[in-house]
């Protein structure tokens, strides 16, 4: 995993009574931390020791505080004002000097045994100072008593304002989503974000791979490389996509920080990397992953260089959502963070023994899903080809409505299947149903109005009534008087005449648009009707 297990040597580290020199050094550390967070319980009680510039109760060494609590005080501090951050920086800076002086003067053989513990304290203090104390060429900005943003300086004012707006917007949106879906409170205090001018600068400082653009440190520290803005025209065109990728990176790292802040520094290693990265990608909606997270041991335990590995983590969360539903997935995440154990959450929420069972269930589910999809696609494709082969000639306009109907029924089967029952796939058959309905209505209306290839004119000589109008017959080459000799009684004579393409459609359209069926032709009036002749 890259993270020391909860029962490893680091997690068992404790202050021992026999190590007098190291205990005294830790006591001085606790004394300095106590004035910073007066609302917390005393970190150390026992033998009376004075606290400078404060009148708090003396600290006694008989009731010892665990190292995990000490680490959390540094890595997960609840500092809500800029002045509290400055006070914390001042105390930790003094502590580093005292630790160095104590180590230099120490001759105790027990110093080697406590070196890991002290090195951890020193490294956490250095990490806090790196994010909370701006170095030369950097500017520290506090946003809404929640974010401490360290930016390169000088920077173009427009770019700086846009960055602050994007980060504030992403944080606010993600925090609301966390409270609405995960339903776990986030500890108060600043979350520290440090922006680097480019990936190379951040890579050199943390030893990351060249493609990495973000890294999260337990519990409140996030480093992100700013996207490179090309000056060429095509770089301007890509600006929207680059900005979107930057916002996704910020959201991904903030999810890591939220998880770390919730479980605390001591339990950060209890969350396996598949859980951390899979949930960060799922919850932030990020598509490309080029980030890393740091474990309590100080080493970078995640640096995505393999797209396939990222896909595997994403598929695990996709499997949980598809099989159990989103509510159950979020309940699993909530139980993992509250109980500081993913394995117990798997057993209690998903009824899976461990990660191996989860992977096995996901692989089996994926195979069954692929077999279901193949069968459905083959059946639907066979029916579509059958329709395309059968519907020819006059029935050809019905190809599209029936084809869409087959696909629509197939998508309904998909939405009803257990593989998509808990997803939003139901929107697809709804949309296809609307398309099918439109095509069906359109085809029916078009079928009724298809111009015939041939028509038959029925011609009957008649005289107009008083309320009738008479229109001239416009087609001289179509002799409607043919077959009706003059001088005979009109009620006994009528004629028929067939008209073929291309005149059939034109004549029928003319007759349908006229307000009368009585026409004047060559000194006589005739009633003219038409009917289509089927092939």
Image: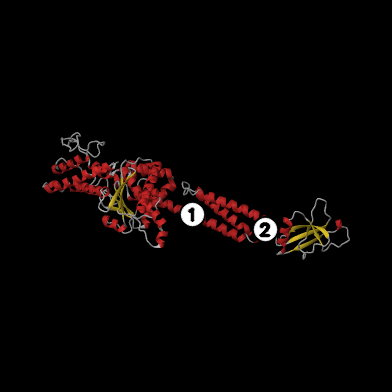
197 left or right of 397 in image: left
Relative to the observer, which residue lies in front, 32 or 178? Answer: 32
Instruction: Give the image location of residue 124, x and y in percent.
Output: 24, 47
Q: Residue at x 75, y 63 (%)?
A: 499
Q: Secondary structure at mark 1?
A: helix
Residue position marked by numbered label 1 in the rendering: 373
Relative to the observer, which residue lies in front, 1 or 118? Answer: 118
Instruction: Give the image location of residue 36, x and y in percent.
Output: 24, 40
Residue position marked by numbered label 2 in the rendering: 450
* Residue count near mark 1 (Cα–Cα under 10 Å), binned few <14, some 14–19, many ≥20: some
440 left or right of 370 in image: right
Q: Secondary structure at mark 2?
A: loop
- Badge 1 or badge 2: first in the primary sequence: 1
Name which quarter of the figure residue 258 lies in.
Answer: top left
- Tell me if residue 130 can be seen: yes
Instruction: Give the image location of residue 100, x and y in percent.
Output: 16, 48
Residue 215 vs 30, above or below: the answer is below
Q: Residue at x 70, y 62 (%)?
A: 453
Q: Nearer the viewer, mark 1 or mark 2?
A: 2
Q: Residue at x 73, y 58 (%)?
A: 510
Name which quarter of the figure residue 184 lies in.
Answer: top left
Instruction: Give the image location of residue 212, x and y in percent.
Output: 33, 56
Relative to the observer, which residue lies in front, 226 or 501? Answer: 226
Name which quarter of the figure residue 47 lies in.
Answer: top left
Q: Residue furthest toward the bottom?
A: 477
């Amino acid at each position: 995993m890259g993270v020391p297990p909860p029962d490893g040597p680091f997690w068992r580290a404790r202050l021992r009574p026999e190590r007098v020199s190291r205990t005294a050094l830790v006591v001085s550390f606790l004394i300095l931390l106590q004035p910073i967070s007066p609302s917390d319980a005393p970190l150390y009680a026992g033998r009376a020791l004075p606290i400078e510039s404060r009148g708090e109760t003396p600290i006694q060494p008989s009731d010892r505080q665990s190292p995990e609590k000490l680490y959390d005080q540094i890595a997960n501090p609840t500092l809500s004002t800029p002045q509290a951050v400055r006070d914390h920086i001042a105390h930790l800076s003094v502590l580093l000097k005292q630790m160095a002086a104590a180590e230099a003067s120490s001759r105790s053989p027990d110093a080697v045994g406590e070196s890991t513990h002290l090195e951890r304290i020193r490294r956490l203090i250095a990490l806090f100072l790196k994010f909370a104390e701006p170095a030369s060429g950097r500017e520290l900005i506090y946003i809404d008593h929640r974010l401490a943003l360290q930016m390169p300086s000088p920077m173009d004012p427009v770019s700086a304002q846009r960055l602050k707006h994007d980060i504030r917007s992403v944080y606010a949106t993600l925090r609301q989503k966390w409270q609405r879906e995960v339903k776990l409170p986030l500890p108060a205090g600043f979350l520290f974000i440090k922006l680097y001018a480019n990936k190379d600068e951040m890579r050199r400082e943390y030893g990351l791979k060249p493609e990495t653009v973000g890294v999260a440190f337990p519990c409140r520290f996030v480093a992100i490389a700013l996207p490179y803005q090309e000056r060429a025209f095509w770089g301007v065109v890509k600006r929207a996509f680059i900005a979107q990728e930057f916002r996704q990176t910020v959201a991904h790292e903030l999810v890591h920080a939220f998880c770390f802040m919730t479980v605390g520094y001591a339990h950060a290693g209890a969350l396996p990397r598949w859980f951390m990265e899979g949930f960060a990608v799922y919850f932030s909606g990020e598509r490309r992953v080029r980030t890393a997270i740091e474990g309590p041991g100080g080493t970078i335990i995640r640096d995505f260089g393999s797209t396939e590995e990222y896909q595997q983590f994403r598929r695990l969360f996709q499997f949980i959502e598809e099989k159990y539903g989103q509510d159950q997935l979020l309940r699993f995440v909530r139980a993992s963070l509250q109980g500081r154990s993913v394995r117990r959450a798997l057993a209690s929420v998903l009824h899976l023994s461990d990660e191996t069972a989860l992977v096995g269930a996901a692989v089996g589910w994926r195979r069954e899903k692929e077999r279901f999809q193949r069968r459905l696609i083959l059946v639907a494709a066979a029916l579509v080809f059958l329709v395309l082969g059968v519907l020819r000639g006059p029935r050809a306009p019905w190809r599209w409505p029936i084809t869409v109907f087959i696909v629509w029924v197939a998508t309904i089967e998909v939405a009803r299947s257990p593989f998509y029952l808990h997803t939003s796939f139901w929107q697809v058959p709804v949309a296809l149903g609307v398309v099918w309905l439109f095509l069906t209505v359109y085809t029916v209306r078009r079928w009724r109005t298809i111009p015939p290839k041939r028509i038959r004119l029925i011609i009957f000589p008649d005289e107009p009534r008083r309320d009738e109008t008479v229109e001239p017959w416009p087609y001289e080459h179509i002799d409607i008087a043919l077959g009706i000799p003059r001088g005979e009684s009109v009620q006994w004579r009528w004629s028929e005449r067939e008209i073929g393409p291309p005149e059939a459609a034109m004549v029928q359209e003319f007759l349908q648009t006229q307000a009368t069926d009585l026409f004047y032709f060559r000194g006589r009036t005739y009633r003219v009707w038409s009917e289509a002749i089927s092939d």
